[in-house]
């Protein structure tokens, strides 16, 4: 299996923290030296391990923003 590399370009915010210290974050991440994408996933405190997550382009993030604004919460 090929090694996955990443570079966190910006941290936008932490949504939650587990009892073990892992945080669910929205970040801008470059995966395998490619164009950075918006990334939502859990990270350990040192940012050396991560859980499963999703990546979004700017356009996808804008559409998600519109959906969230229109939610009747």
Image (cartoon, grey):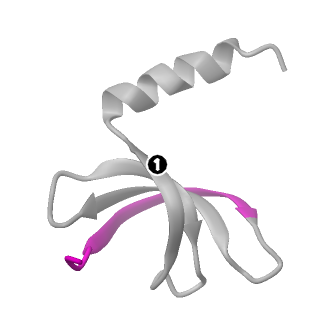
Q: Which residues are magenta?
A: 1-16
Quadrant including the C terminus: top right
Q: Which structural element holds mark 1?
A: strand
> What residue do we see at 60% from left, 84% from top?
45
* 69 to 15, vertically: above or below: above
The number of numbered badges drawn on the structure is 1
Q: Is residue 7 magenta?
A: yes
Residue topped by disc 1: 54
Considering only vertical position in the picture, is 36 above or below 44? above
Residue 26 x/y as whole percent: 52, 53
Secondary structure mostly taken by the magenta-highlighted segment of the chain: strand
Q: Residues within 10 Å of mark 1 (few under 14, many from 20)?
A: few
Considering the image in quadrants, where does the N terminus appear?
A: bottom left
Q: Quadrant of residue 70?
A: top right
Any magenta on residue 15? yes
Give left or right: position of 4 versus 62: left
* Residue 40, above or below 24: above
At 15% from the left edge and 57% from the top edge, which residue is drawn?
34
Give the residue drawn at x 54%, y 59%. Answer: 41
How far across and how far down the image is residue 66, in percent?
A: 55, 17
Residue 50 percent location from the top left of the image: 50, 73
What residue is drawn where x is 59% and y is 80%?
A: 44
Does residue 15 appear left or right of residue 58 in this picture? right
């Amino acid at each position: 299996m090929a090694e996955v590399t990443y570079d966190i370009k910006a941290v936008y915010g932490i949504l939650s923290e587990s009892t073990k210290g892992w945080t669910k974050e929205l970040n801008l991440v470059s995966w395998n030296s490619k164009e950075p994408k918006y990334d939502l996933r859990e990270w350990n405190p040192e940012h050396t391990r991560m859980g499963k997550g999703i990546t979004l382009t700017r356009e996808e993030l804008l559409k998600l923003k519109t959906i969230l604004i229109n939610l009747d919460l």
